């Protein structure tokens, strides 16, 4: 679950020949508006001017990597980055978890083999002991996994790493056969369309309706504001429009929690200021029952985003602005609902989330 780790930052990587050379990224600023965050994720630049295509012996060709593999290595000034090759299929959901020892600053990057696209990367900071990255592959083909030190090829951090790698075919990132929906209109109209599409059972009733609301926090971590006067549901459709007045950091997020039980377990769906859709279900002190964190390219920060959650039994399907994003499998539970606002560690600003047309339709 992304919220348990350091904020999402980008450090761009560029590949040359069989090995890779590290590049830089440039931030893109945007103007604030009632439904618009203060910053977006940085994007990869082209090859830096003057960058050499000469193979760098500090970049280690480490062979193929496959689902379920766990690999290890030692990073020092002579072995700065390890490169693994993955033969992927469109829609594959990759999950990479890196743990480090000895003062190494973690770095993970995923790029296409043709050197044209840096899909996603994340860099830690001094003192971090782990880093996680997930990405959905846009096409069939070869991809390169870059593992190294976050302070770059000219940095000084050293130590050992272990990388756990998994690849799940077609789960998440919108690669499913689930068709887009029309999320607009009255709740009974939206639910009727979902019933016609076979996504929810017949019947049910509207349980909660909130026209406008907001959630504000300047603290780190998650803050909750319960809605619905204690109304509970297990099988449900939840819909809300969400955006920002202000965002404390690029990783700040606005969303809703649901199925919030008396034991404190809950499910959540949030949109972050750096264009990520985050969804998870907690399970006490154990690992989450599911955890999804993917950057999306179709959010509308000017007008807000319509988030639709369909939770029937163990299956949870999530749509944003009518587009299917992911289906996850968790545990059916009956619980209450709350607005949820998140600020990452070391956040120094206030996150002000704005909500409109929150409603819940309950089948149980």
Image: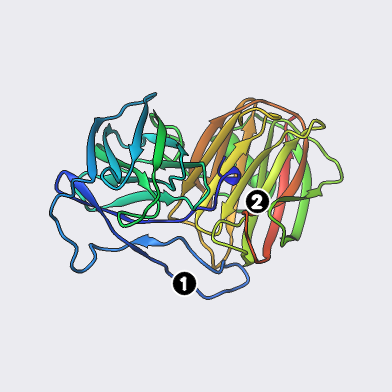
- Image coordinates of residue 304 in percent, x first then y, are 59, 62
Secondary structure of the residue carrying numbered label 2: strand
In the rendered image of this protein, does residue 244 appear above or below residue 322?
below
In the depicted view, which residue is nearer to us: 14 or 262?
14
In the rendered image of this protein, does residue 205 appear above or below residue 284?
below
- Image coordinates of residue 149 in percent, x first then y, are 38, 48
Q: Badge 2: how crowded within 10 Å, few (<14), some, or many (20+)?
A: many
Note whether residue 139 is visible.
no
Identified at 68% across, 47% down, the residue is 256
Secondary structure of the residue carrying numbered label 1: loop
Q: Earlier in the sequence, mark 2 or mark 1?
A: 1
Asked which colour scheme the image uses, the reply is: rainbow
Identified at 34% across, 55% down, the residue is 152
Residue 255's tag is 2
- Answer with left or right where residue 130 lies relative to residue 364: left
Note whether residue 14 is visible.
yes
Report the residue that reaches farthest toward the right.
229
Residue 196's tag is none
Report the residue that reaches farthest toward the bottom.
31
Q: Dividing the image into 4 quarters, which one contains the C terminus?
A: top right
In the depicted view, which residue is nearer to us: 245 or 320?
245
Circle 1 residue: 29
In the depicted view, which residue is nearer to us: 191 or 177?
177
């Amino acid at each position: 679950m992304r919220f348990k780790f350091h904020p999402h930052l980008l450090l761009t990587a560029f590949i040359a020949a069989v090995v890779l050379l590290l590049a830089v990224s440039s931030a893109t600023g945007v103007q604030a508006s009632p439904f618009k965050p203060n910053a977006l994720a940085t994007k990869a630049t082209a090859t830096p001017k003057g960058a050499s295509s000469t193979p760098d012996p500090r970049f280690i060709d480490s062979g193929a990597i496959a689902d379920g593999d766990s690999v290890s290595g030692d990073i020092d000034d002579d072995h700065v980055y390890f490169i693994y090759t993955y033969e992927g299929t469109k829609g594959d959901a990759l999950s990479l978890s890196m743990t480090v020892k000895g003062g190494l600053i973690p770095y993970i990057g995923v790029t296409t083999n043709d050197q044209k696209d840096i899909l996603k990367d994340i860099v830690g900071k001094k003192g971090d002991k782990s880093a996680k990255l997930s990405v959905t592959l846009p096409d069939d083909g070869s991809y390169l996994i870059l593992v190294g030190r976050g302070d770059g090829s000219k940095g000084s951090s050293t130590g050992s790493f272990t990388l756990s790698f998994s690849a799940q075919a077609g789960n998440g990132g919108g690669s499913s056969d689930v068709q887009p929906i029309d999320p607009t209109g009255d709740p009974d109209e939206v639910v009727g369309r979902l019933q016609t599409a076979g996504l929810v059972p017949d019947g049910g009733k509207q349980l909660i309706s909130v026209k406008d609301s907001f959630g504000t926090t300047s603290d780190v971590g998650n803050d909750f504001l319960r809605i619905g006067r204690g109304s509970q549901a297990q099988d449900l459709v939840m819909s809300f429009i969400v955006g920002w007045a202000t965002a404390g950091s690029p990783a700040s997020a606005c969303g809703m929690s649901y199925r919030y039980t008396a034991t404190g377990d809950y499910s959540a769906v949030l949109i972050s200021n750096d264009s990520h859709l985050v969804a998870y279900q907690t399970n006490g002190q154990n690992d989450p029952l599911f955890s999804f964190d993917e950057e999306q390219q179709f959010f509308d920060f000017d007008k807000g985003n319509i988030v639709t959650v369909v939770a029937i039994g163990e299956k949870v399907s999530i749509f944003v602005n009518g587009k299917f994003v992911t289906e996850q499998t968790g545990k059916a539970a009956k619980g209450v609902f709350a607005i949820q606002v998140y600020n990452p560690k070391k956040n120094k600003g206030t996150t002000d989330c704005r909500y409109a047309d929150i409603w819940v339709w309950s089948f149980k």
